Image (cartoon, grey):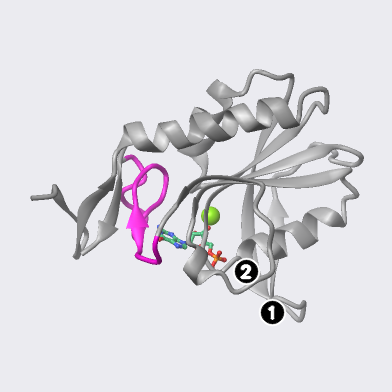
Amino acid sequence: MKEIITIRDRQFELFIEQEIIEQGIKRIAAQINADLKGKNPIFLAVLNGAFMFAGELMKEVSIPSEITFVRLASYDGTTTTNHVQEVMGLNESIEGRCVVVVEDIVDSGNTMVALKEELEKLNPQEIKVATLLFKPAALRQKLHLDYVALEIPSDFIVGYGLDYDGYGRNLKDIYKVK
Ligand code: 5GP
Ligand code: MG
């Protein structure tokens, strides 16, 4: 029997344990250390969901780098993706920089495509994407992901920074909805 927990009105079952999550994070950190050596990257972690992933990832990143945290405010617009992501809290210039977006999860890909469009306007040298989780079967955008810690099926999940109705971000393992 898998461990079952209740968050608000829903039941969730244990899906991916911390040890497996952190193996995935270590693997992509090693790739980043090799690929981005000498590029002095600036990591841009997207709150709230990526806070735990960003913390664990950065402990494994050993090259000179910066990290900063942003929030997205989405509203409907008329871009190709039909919604715009306003990037809030970015005080550092990313012009000419190697930017690594640190996200919790890529589902349809809409959020990431819109975020990349916004960041491109700030003239970075390049934008890499690191995501803790990726649901390949749900992707509806043409989007290249540089670093993926774990690929998962399209179920709704919580834990390791991801929430259900604001709760569950503190869980050290990942759970999926029953
Ligand atoms: P996308 O724009 O790729 O469809 O969705 C990205 C956003 O949807 C994520 O940043 C996250 O906020 C939310 N999301 C997608 N799938 C899940 C999930 O399984 N669990 C949680 N908690 N959020 C999800
Ligand atoms: Mg997110």
In the rendered image, residue 10, in percent from the top left (x then y), is placed at 20, 64
Instruction: Indicate whether 165 appears above or below 37.
Output: below
Contact between marks 1 and 2 (CB within 8 A): the answer is yes
Q: Amino acid at mark 2?
A: Asn
Residue depicted at x 74% and y 19%: 64
Q: Element under label 1?
A: loop
Q: Earlier in the sequence, mark 1 or mark 2?
A: 1
In the rendered image, residue 53, in percent from the top left (x then y), is placed at 49, 37
Q: Is mark 2 within 8 Å of ligand 1?
A: yes
Task: Tell whether position 168 is magenta.
Answer: yes
Residue depicted at x 67% and y 35%: 68
Q: Amino acid at mark 1?
A: Asn
Q: Is mark 1 within 8 Å of ligand 1?
A: no
Question: Viewer-proximal residue, 93 or 144?
Answer: 144
Q: Which residue is mark 2?
A: 110
Work out how far the residue at label 1 is from the one at label 2, CA to CA, in angstroms. 9 Å
In the rendered image, residue 66, in percent from the top left (x then y), is placed at 72, 27
The magenta stretch spans which residues?
Answer: 153-170
